Amino acid sequence: MSIQDNPFQAPVARLQDQGDLVVDDFRAEGRLVPLSHGYRWLQRGWAIFRTAPGTWIGIAVACMGVLLILGSIPLLNVVVNLLAPVFIGGLSIGCRAIDDGEGIRFAHLFAGFSRRPGTLLMVGLLYLLGLLAMAIIIGVFAALTGAMALGTAAGAGDEAAMWTFLLSVGVMILVFTPLAMAVWLAPPLVVLHDFSASQAIWTSLRVALRNFPPFMVYGVLVLLLAVCASLPLLLGWLLLLPVIYASLYAAYRDIFFNE
């Protein structure tokens, strides 16, 4: 059997020309979409999942396995944040293959390692640095508010502690939201349009800010679905994880193209 006939071969065809993806229809500045599209991205993600549920579940099992293994090893758990954009980039190529009528394959999970892996890893590194900065900001804020709480009267200590916690959560949301926006659509911009890491992150942040209402609807829905998916021994993630990955591609197509 020749290597061309090998069904387990990593996808190499059409990966290098994905940067030329219908550039005449691509809108690098993005476009404004209605609030309801935050729900439609998940709806479209579910439709993409249904094109090959078995393959998508296999991809989810592999992703969860990698996350659990790396997350349980000290010092290596940071690698998860570096690899996430690589995997998402590869799955963006897979979603594009579905649009082309070729269908997704399990090997698309690793396609990012053959299509601009250095740039995708740089996106992950910048995201990791952003998480570190966020942790420092929250730590300093918690320390300052905690010191203020200790200086209050004993009778008001519990109330002060509650407000300290709520304020810390609020600061975390305020800091993490733009960070999430910055990496939200960066991987498909890298693998499908040859953006640099900084260009992809800046563009993702800019279009997310312009589409803040649907982005927040999407984020809240993902959060609620994540809670539901975690209840039955995390089994719901076998469905939710592929839908989230596919919905990222759906959001990218919706915002950067005239559908």
Image (cartoon, helix red, strand yellow):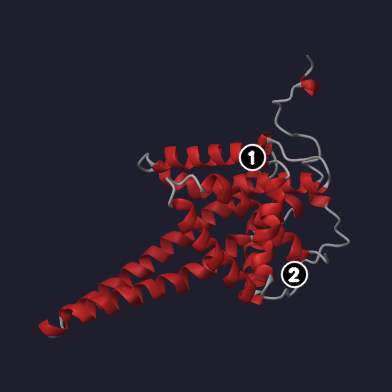
At label 1, the amino acid type is Leu
Compared across the picture, whether 151 is left or right of 118 comes to left
Looking at the picture, tell me which residue is in the foreground, 131 or 64: 64
Disc with the residue nearer the chain's start (1 vs 2): 2
Residue 187 rendering spot, x and y as whole percentages: 65, 53
Q: Seen from this angle, which residue lies furthest right?
A: 24
Quadrant assignment for the N terminus: top right
Seen at 66% across and 57% down, the residue is: 247
Mark identifier at residue 139: none
Q: Which quadrant would residue 83 be assigned to in this image?
A: top right
Q: Mark 1, mark 2: which one is toward the viewer?
A: 1
- Please tell me whether residue 91 is drawn above or below residue 9 in the rendered image: below
User: How would you rate the neighbour count of disc 2 (Cα within 10 Å): few for under 14, some for 14-19, many for 20 or more?
Assistant: many
Crowding at dot 1, Cα within 10 Å, few <14 / some 14-19 / many 20+, comes out as many
- Image coordinates of residue 166 in percent, x first then y, are 33, 76
Identified by mark 2, the residue type is Gly
Residue 30 bears which disc, if any? 2
Residue lying at 66% horizontally and 74% vertically, measured from the top left? 211
| Residue 54, horizontal then vertical, whole percent | 65, 37
View extreme (top): residue: 1
Q: Quadrant of the C terminus?
A: bottom right
The x and y percentages for residue 77 are 42, 45
Give the answer, above or below, for where 178 lies relative to 156.
above
Rendering quarter of residue 248: bottom right
- Locate residue 152 relative to residue 81 in the image: left or right: left
Q: Say the numbered circle drawn on residue 109.
A: 1
Say if residue 75 shows up in the picture.
Answer: yes
Residue lying farthest to the left in this orientation: 154
Residue at (54, 64) in percent of width and height: 180
CB under 8 Å between callouts 1 and 2?
no
Q: For the residue labelled by badge 2, is the local secondary structure a helix, a strand or a loop?
A: loop
